[in-house]
Image (tube, grey):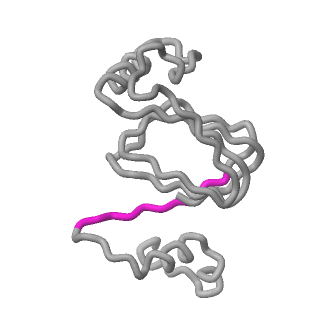
Amino acid sequence: TVANFTLPDALKSVSMNEIYKNVLSDTTFEAGDKVAHYLLVSEGGALTLWHQGFSGTSVMYFLMKGCKVFYLVRPSPNNVMLFNKFLAQPRRDIFFGSHPDLDEGGCQRVVLIGRQAVCMAPGMIHCVQTIGTSIALG
């Protein structure tokens, strides 16, 4: 059964999941804090839809290889209201980041190349474009 599965030692040395856990092993968290991590491999041309991070958590995104363009909109009350209206419309082929009523700086474009990182605050409204094959650790 899955409950009885143990990762063989030979795989632990190359598992990004295990390597990442070892990096964080010296980090102290408050009781109840949770840390989730993932390895994301994307092909060039991949594009996420506009979305907000789920579960109200911050996201640290470390790009190991490649290039990604993040389009970020601060989750102010006005921007969240506009975003919810955007999600409710039948057409989504319009670039939300160019909405004329966005406040707090509107949409910010952040280009990430290999060995760079970005940290997104909880609820950040964003979409991501992948330029070439990329590998990221979140």
In the visual, does 123 lie left or right of 95? left
Whether residue 135 is situated above or below residue 125 in the rendered picture: below
Q: How many marks?
A: 0
In the visual, does 118 lie left or right of 87? right
Whether residue 133 is situated above or below residue 84 in the rendered picture: below
Would residue 62 be counted in the magenta stretch?
no
Image coordinates of residue 57 in percent, x first then y, are 35, 51
Image coordinates of residue 11 in percent, x first then y, are 63, 80
Q: What residue is rendered at 46% in x and 25% in y?
A: 106
User: For the magenta stretch, what is the residue range?
Assistant: 32-41
Q: Nearer the viewer, residue 46 or 80?
A: 80
Question: Is the magenta region chiefly helix, strand or loop?
Answer: loop
Q: Quadrant of residue 83?
A: top left
Q: What residue is rendered at 68% in x and 41% in y?
A: 130
Q: Quadrant of residue 33?
A: bottom left
User: Can residue 5 be seen in the rendering of this structure?
Assistant: yes
Q: Nearer the viewer, residue 30 or 116?
A: 116
Q: What residue is rendered at 64% in x and 48% in y?
A: 112
Would residue 37 be counted in the magenta stretch?
yes
Q: What residue is rendered at 24% in x and 66% in y?
A: 32
Q: State the residue lying farthest toward the bottom.
A: 9
